[in-house]
Image (spheres, rainbow, N blue to C red):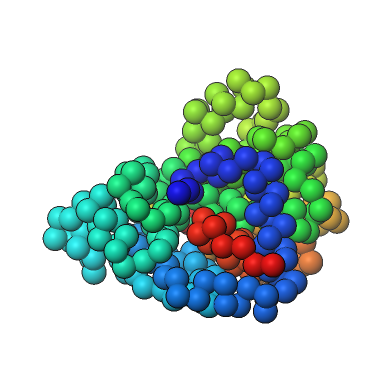
Amino acid sequence: MRHLMNPLDFTVEELDSLFDLANDIEKNPAKYAHACEGKKLATCFYEPSTHTRLSFESAMLSLGGQVLGFSDAGSSSASKGESVSDTIRVISCFADICAMRHPKEGAPMVAAEKSSIPVINAGDGGHQHPTQTLTDLLTIRSLKGQLGNFTVGLCGDLKFGRTVHSLINALVRYPNIHFIFISPPELRVPDYITDMLQERNISYEEVIRLEDCISKLDLLYMTRVQRERFFNEEDYVRLKDFYILNKAKMELAKDNMLILHPLPRVNEISVEVDDDPRAVYFKQVQYGVYVRMALILTLLGITCE
Ligand code: NCD
C-alpha cells in the first residue's frame, strides 16, 4: 500500500506516468467515469479549505466513487481529544482512501503509519502540499511541453508557503532549473531549502523587487501571504500587499511566461491580469482535478483499458 506525503514519494518516471494518465483523463473522461464505483474517499480536513477539498471530492465523483468527511476540526472527534492515529483507524473502516489536511506538520504521516488505507497529505502546516505540486507540475508540463530548462520565479510568502516548499523540492529533480526567490526579507525561503540547493549545486538568487527580475522568468509562481501562520497581525498587515502583480509589471515579462498561483488569491495579482493569456491559475485548478483523479486511481491500483 502506498501513501503520498511528499512529492518525492514518486520517482520522476512514476510522475510521468501519473501525468500521462491525467492527460488521458482530460481527453477521455467517459473512459474513467465508473472506474471508482463502489469506492469511497474520506476527506479529513482539520484546517479550512474549499479549493483542495472540493477538488478531491470532484475528482472522486468524476470517477464514479463516493465521498464522506469533515471540513473542520471543530466538527470532528479531534475536538473531544481523539488523536489522528485513532481517527485514521476509524476512517479506515469507512473509506478506501483518505485525503488529510492538518495544521500540524507531519500529522498525515503519523496517520499513515496506523492506516490500513492509502493516505494523501492534502497540506500539513507550513510543510508540504504534494497534490498542489502535482497540479503545478501537470499544468507546466501540459502548457509548456516539458518540465526542465526554466527560470522559475517564486514570489510572496516563501517562508510559510507550503506550496512553495513542495514545488521547489519537486523541481530540483528536473534539468537546468534556475530559481529566483522574490520575497521581503522577513518571508525568505527557509534555510533548509537554500542549504539543499547549495548541496545539489542548483542555482538560485534571492531578490526583493519583482520588477527587477520578471523579464528573466519563464514561470512566475505567485503566492498569498499566509496570514494564519503569522505570530502577530501587525506584521501581516505590513507585509500583505508587498507584491501586486498588475498589467504594468506584466509588460516587462516574456510573451510566453506563465503565471501560476495555488489560490486563494488575495491582492497579490490584480484582477486586471486575469484576462492575460499568460495567466493560467484558473486552468491550473482544472488540472488539479485531473491529477487528483490520476492519483486516486494510482493509489487504489485501478487501471482502465
Ligand atoms: C494553498 C494551501 O492551502 O497551502 N491553497 C491550496 O491548497 N490551493 C495555498 C494557500 O492557502 O495560500
User: Image quadrant of residue 164?
Assistant: top right
- The answer to whether residue 301 of the structure is visible from this angle is yes
Q: Which residue is situated farthest in the left direction here?
A: 80
Between 22 and 235, the one nearer to me in the picture: 22
Spot occupied by residue 5 in the image (x, y as percentages of width and height): 46, 46
Spot occupied by residue 78 in the image (x, y as percentages of width and height): 21, 59
Q: Identify the residue at horizontal 69%, vertical 43% (top origin).
A: 13
Q: Identify the residue at horizontal 72%, vertical 37% (top origin).
A: 174
User: Image quadrant of residue 259?
Assistant: bottom right
Q: Identify the residue at horizontal 79%, vertical 48% (top origin).
A: 146
Figure check: 279 above or below 66 = above
Between 232 and 119, the one nearer to me in the picture: 119
Figure check: 277 above or below 130 = below
Instruction: Judge from the rendering whether residue 197 lies leftward or rightward of residue 86; answer left or right.
Output: right
Spot occupied by residue 241 in the image (x, y as percentages of width and height): 53, 55
Count of labels in the image: 0
Q: Which residue is situated farthest in the right direction here?
A: 255
| Quadrant in which the C terminus is drawn | bottom right
Between 236 and 25, the one nearer to me in the picture: 25
Spot occupied by residue 202 in the image (x, y as percentages of width and height): 68, 27
Q: Identify the residue at horizontal 60%, vertical 20% (top origin).
A: 199
- The answer to whether residue 58 of the structure is visible from this angle is no
Figure check: 77 above or below 108 = below
